[in-house]
């Protein structure tokens, strides 16, 4: 018997509504290894013992000693807000940003409830009556290519924006033309008191390009960044959500 040998645990599974948001890391533990002896056969005698095959190890695993699985968020390009729980839970965060591009910060509230992410501005939005909606695929640049990170149903009603996952949108990004390109920027306050600019540009095909500083990626969830970009396009460029056909993120 050998004690303290490292063995790999397999066959563990995650269950529940949020299981798809996580993956199990490699699980190991310590075990005692005991060699299995062959059964004796007639004709074997002490004077002429048979040749013994090499023992085949068998492990006795104490399940209670296995460390809890490491839960790793699946997918790429997303970070959770400091006060936010993973998808399927609820959370909120307050902040401020120069949504109108006037140099004045306007306060906002970010909320997460189930799979719906929302952004509410604490200011009136003159002229925004009714509900504006779109189904939009979202991409993020990785190297020279843009990779699909999801598709969302986007809705605006007054000063509230929301994003909910959608399965009915093609995950194809058309070639990005520079024709009719229009630009805007929103300064967003960070927890340390500094601000960073989220830059947006939309072309004649309705593709919204969003330049995101690393500090904003690290502070906000990509779905809330999506809503920041949509609101910026609406307030500064007067673009309705229904006119945006796709969103392409890149880090600045």
Image (spheres, rainbow, N blue to C red):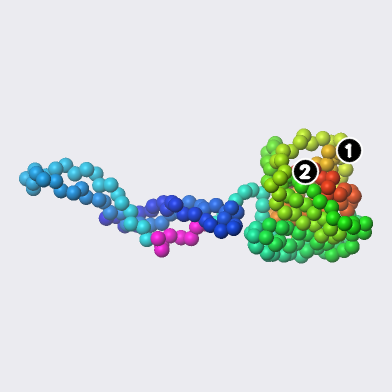
Q: Which residue is mark 1?
A: 180
The quadrant of the image that shows the N terminus is bottom left
Q: Nearer the viewer, residue 160 or 214?
A: 160
> Per the image, is 228 magenta?
no
Q: Residue at x 83, y 41 (%)?
A: 206
**SS of the residue under disc 1:** loop
Give the quadrant of residue 3. bottom left
Give the quadrant of residue 107. bottom right
Q: Characterize the local packing of mark 1: few (<14), some (14-19) or many (20 or more) Cα atoms within 10 angstroms.
A: few
Image coordinates for residue 161, horizontal then vertical, percent: 80, 57
Q: Can residue 103 be seen here?
A: no
Give the quadrant of residue 50. top left
Q: Nearer the viewer, residue 46 or 238?
A: 238
Q: Characterize the local packing of mark 2: few (<14), some (14-19) or many (20 or more) Cα atoms within 10 angstroms.
A: many
> Per the image, is 68 magenta?
yes
Q: Is residue 136 above or below residue 178?
A: below
């Amino acid at each position: 018997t050998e004690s303290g040998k490292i063995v790999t645990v397999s066959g563990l599974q995650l269950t529940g509504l949020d299981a798809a948001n996580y993956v199990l890391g490699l699980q190991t533990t310590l075990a005692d290894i005991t060699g299995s002896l062959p059964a004796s056969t007639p004709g074997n005698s002490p004077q002429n013992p048979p040749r013994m095959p090499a023992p085949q190890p068998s492990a006795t695993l104490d399940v209670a000693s296995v460390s809890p699985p490491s839960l790793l968020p699946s997918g790429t390009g997303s970070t959770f807000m400091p006060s936010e729980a993973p998808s399927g839970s609820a959370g909120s965060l307050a902040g401020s940003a120069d949504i109108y591009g006037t140099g004045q910060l306007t306060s906002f509230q970010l909320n997460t409830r189930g799979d719906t992410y929302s952004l509410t501005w604490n200011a009136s939005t003159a002229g925004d009556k009714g509900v504006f909606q779109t189904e939009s695929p979202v991409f993020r640049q990785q190297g020279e290519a843009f990779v699909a990170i999801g598709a969302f149903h986007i809705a605006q009603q007054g000063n509230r924006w929301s994003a909910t996952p959608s399965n009915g949108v093609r995950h194809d990004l058309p070639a990005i033309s520079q024709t009719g390109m229009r630009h805007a920027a929103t300064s967003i306050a960070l927890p340390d008191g500094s601000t960073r600019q989220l830059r947006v540009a939309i072309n004649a095909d309705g593709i919204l390009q969003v330049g995101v500083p690393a500090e904003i990626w690290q502070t906000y969830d990509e779905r809330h960044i999506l809503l920041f970009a949509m609101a910026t396009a609406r307030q500064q460029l007067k673009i309705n959500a229904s006119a945006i056909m796709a969103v392409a993120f890149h880090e600045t």
